[in-house]
Image (cartoon, rainbow, N blue to C red):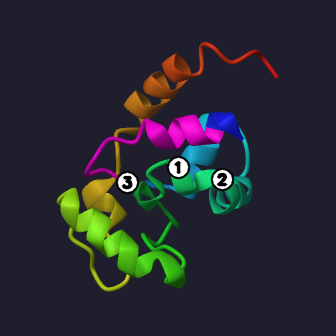
Amino acid sequence: MERVLRAVEQVPRGRLVAYGDIARTVGIGARQVGWIMRHWGSNVPWWRVVNASGQLPEHLVDEAHTLWAQEGIVPSGRGVSLSDYRADLAQLTIDWERACLDLSAD
């Protein structure tokens, strides 16, 4: 769980990733990332993690639109274009590995 949350914390302001991007970085499944975000993601920038279509669950869309606007992300409908806003995944992995140095090996 902590590794997923730390990965989300590394997504830069104004950039987005898909659940699958975080999953590949951390080495778990995208559904597991979604489950972790649903239960423990409220204290990390959850609005920066969307599904592969660039969307969030319906109950989060209004708040996400406000947060996206604050970061310069322009939504299209109820989602965003990942191709326009996707974070540099190689850099995300480097930043995540650095952020996890204090965690013991599982």
| Discs 3/1, front | 1
Instruction: Inspect the magenta stretch and tell me whether residue 11 lies in it.
Output: yes
On the image, numbered disc 3 is attached to which residue? 16
At a point 63% along the width and 46% down the height, the residue shown is: 23
* Kind of residue at badge 3: Leu
Q: Which residues are magenta?
A: 4-16
In the rendering, at what x and y percent does residue 65 appear? 31, 74
Is 77 contained in the magenta span?
A: no
Query: SS of the residue at dot 1?
Result: helix
Q: Position of residue 8 (x, y in %)?
A: 50, 43
Distance in Å between CA atoms under marks 3 and 1: 17 Å
Q: Is residue 21 visible?
A: yes
Q: Write down the quadrant of residue 19 in the picture.
A: bottom right
The residue to which callout 1 is attached is 43
Q: Residue at x 59, y 41 (%)?
A: 5
Q: Which residue is mark 2?
A: 40
